Image (cartoon, grey):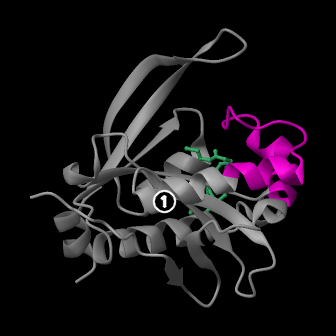
Amino acid sequence: MDIKPFFAPEYYITDEFTIRSYMLGDGPLLAEAVNASYEHLKRFMPWAKPHTEDIEAENTIRRWRGEYLLATNFTLGVFDPDGKRLLGSSGFHLREGDLNNRAAEIGMWIRADAAHKGLGSRVLRAILTWGFTAWPWERLTWRCNEENIASRRTAEKAGMRLEGRFRAVTRLPDGTRETMLAFAILKDEWEMGNR
Ligand SMILES: CC(C)(COP(=O)(O)OP(=O)(O)OC[C@H]1O[C@@H](n2cnc3c(N)ncnc32)[C@H](O)[C@@H]1OP(=O)(O)O)[C@@H](O)C(=O)NCCC(=O)NCCS
């Protein structure tokens, strides 16, 4: 059955953070967070660069907002409760087919000064709860570099299962090739674990 039209959910609110679509005007918050996190992001986030201008980030979030409204890709910001600071970024990305396939890949980064304190694990649990209750997802996936221990542990702790290991799947700018791990959780597995 076609999901048409699809009006994506906009907000998921907890006491610690709000997960929502990026909105017009969020560009400077995104630029501040990535600029403060370059050293932390550069190892595993190929898009990371030393400095991003506010206007460039604003252009990016406008594209993300457009994709969100068109239901082609759902990039999400993780904001502190008063909305003044971006704690990280996530999203439901349609990498296993279009919306009718009801499967999405979750991406995530947490800003440097908030990382390694349990926040990524709490955000992923929130994303799974939101994803399996308010969104049409029947399968949610997570991919990470085999050497990215924090990412791998974040997925495992949230109950995602390792499904595969793809050797030398991606070529990095320095010419080396990275091995990726693929994790997934199905809606019925998530429901069983949250009864
Ligand atoms: C991966 C990331 C999103 C995880 O979020 P986080 O808030 O740092 O994760 P948490 O603090 O919830 O930690 C999750 C697990 O990873 C472990 N971990 C965290 N940082 C670690 C590190 N630097 N080295 C080894 N393990 C680490 C934690 O100990 C925890 O496992 P445990 O409970 O068994 O001890 C975050 O570290 C990040 O943004 N990294 C850079 C970008 C990135 O790699 N994104 C993922 C791409 S797939």
Q: Is residue 166 above or below residue 42?
A: above
Q: Position of residue 137 (x, y in %)?
A: 27, 61
Rendered residue at 56%/48% (across/down): 151
Displayed quadrant of residue 190: bottom left
Looking at the rendered image, the quarter that the N terminus falls into is bottom left
Q: Could you tell me if residue 166 is visible in this image? A: yes
**Looking at the image, which is closer to me, 116 or 28?**
28
Displayed quadrant of residue 88: bottom right
Q: Mark 1 sits on what residue?
A: 68
**Looking at the image, which is closer to me, 174 or 115?**
174
Q: Position of residue 94 (x, y in %)?
A: 37, 46
Left or right: 33 in relation to 192: right
Left or right: 56 in relation to 20: right
Rendered residue at 70%/86% (across/down): 81
Rendered residue at 32%/77% (across/down): 134
Kind of residue indicated by mark 1: Tyr
